[in-house]
Amino acid sequence: MTMKRVLIAFSVLVIFLLIVPTLVIVPISFNASPSFDFPPKGWSLQWYENFLTDREWLKALGNSVLVAILTAIVATVAGVLASLGLSRLKFRGKSLLENYFLAPMIVPGIVIAIGLYSLFIRLDLLGTIPGFVFAHTIVALPLVIINVMASLQGVDPRLAQAAASLGASKARTFFTVTLPLIVPGVTAGALFAFVTSFDEIILSLFIQDPSLQTLPVKIYRSVTQSTDPTVAAVAVVTMAVSVVVMLAAQLATRKRKALT
Amino acid sequence: MVGLGDRGLTMSSATRAIATDPALATPPASAGRARRSRVKWGPLLLLLPAIAVVTMFFLVPLVDVFIRSVTDPEPGLQNYEWLLTNPVNLEVLARTFLTSLIVTVVCLLVAYPYAYLMTIVGERARGWLTLFVMLPLWTSILVRTLAWMVLLADTGPINDFLEAIGVGRQPLIRTTFGVALGMAQVLLPFMVLPIYSALAKIDRRLLAASSSLGANGLTSFFKVYLPLSRPGIFAGSITVFILGLGFYIIPSLLGSPKEAMVSSLIYQQVSVFLLWGQGAALGIALLVVTIIILVVFNRFVRGASLAPGVEPE
């Protein structure tokens, strides 16, 4: 029993170190003085005001949201189709194909980044919305596939057969039988894709150009080139967006578990 | 478990260990196969968009990197020769391995007790422990690193505290310590989850059996429990290690140029010096090392999981 107490104390400390250090950014974003002092010497909303009135920051925010939405759409459509395809395949190459889709998760980001940089120079895709969307889709797709495959696992294939035997076309079977059953996985996958894109930095650093930057790129530039505390306010806003979207994804998977 | 932690993170992480969750490894029941076998290319058609995107924006760029590494500025292996003979490269590679190793060991030591606690508490508490270890993944690495920059700064709160208690200011940021701390915080979930899933499969009656045969707690742990948890330790360690090798943001913000890891070197060669061939050769080396580690690991774990009491993965 004492051992369990020690373990609990240890784990509480671990949780503390995992979560609390990041939160230090919140009070700093309300700092009255133009510094990263902690604890702040006074309170103000000036850094949020800066963020929300600066055209460059707002443009980056707009780009990030647009790219994340488009990435979520592209990755979800391609990912759902691929998962359906994978679940119907049963040849030896199947796991190979699965690993092919998941490979971008383990290949070091910097290697993909210089490859995309090289490719985008040739295709003239640097600093373009399509460039960002395709690049982000590569790292978002595995998450969609993992979530949708997990959902499909819980679907009884006889349901689709029953629909087909009753005369439903393949498309109709998918939209009226299969899709409603895997909606939680698809939703979670889409939300994961959104956050992945919204927070993506390494690929973005290479494929951006001055005309088109996303929020993480601007944050990185600001951190490395200036000491403007506006970046703290931006960081808090991006953190809030990620956390809210991930909470939604959690709720979606909860429902999935409740269903199966 | 799937769907919780496998966030993409910024450095295209989430992991094979988590990605190839046993749930995915089991072939999906597709009883309809016989019916559909005559339209065999139906499923392939569904796979087409994904294959096209991944090929065009993942495989082609990687091949491109490889080609550049052996053709830029001229055909030949001079970039690899440079890679293996330039002392700075070897130093950076060694430091990258060492940092990743330190992070792996730290994560292992922290994650094992944490994962063990997850196996001995109730369902509800386990849910919370899982949530808490996942929670940091919900925030981007960039934001978390920014927070560490503030905390570890020479005039930051930790140093203020150290000075107040008489220890004096210490170099925290721009040190390997700072880099390892930031990386360990990000990578911990990738250690906890595989270890937990290995520990959860261990039949606890084996411990009762060993103590009934006269072993004390420690002996039972080291002779029975620890060996059975090996697949999880391997999976978690390999994942953390290979993800750690490719870190870029944290070393560049929490380390000094003196702590540069291989990713920073690649960035420098390509973006600053425009020496594509050399940057590409470093990238290919990093990729090959990652693949070799994974392949060796797969062999290793297959053998290890034959141990009794542990379900083969």
Image (cartoon, coloured by chain):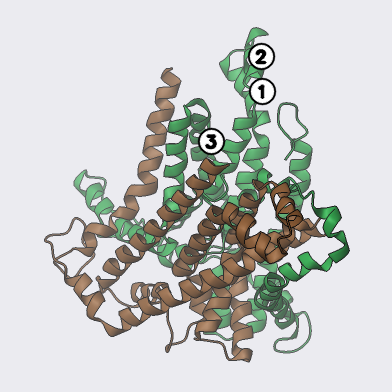
Chain colours: A brown, B green
Asked whether B292 or A237 is in front, the reply is A237
Real-space Cα separation, disc 3 to disc 1, in angstroms: 15 Å
Instruction: Classify residue A219 as left or right of residue A194.
Output: left
Give coordinates of residue A202: x percent, y percent. Answer: 51, 71
Separation (CA) of disc 2 from disc 1? 8 Å
**Residue that appears at 58% across and 59% down:** A143
Report the Cα–Cα distance between label 2 and label 3. 21 Å
Furthest-left residue in this view? A42
Q: Quadrant of the N terminus of chain B?
A: top right
Amino acid type assigned to the residue bearing label 1 in the image: Val
Give the quarter of the image for residue B59.
bottom right
The label shown at residue B224 is 1
* Residue that badge 2 annotates: B210
Marked residue nearer the N-terminal end (2 or 3): 3
Identify the residue under disc 3.
Answer: B112
Q: Chain of mark 2?
A: B
Amino acid carrying mark 2 in the image: Ser
A161 lies left or right of A9? right
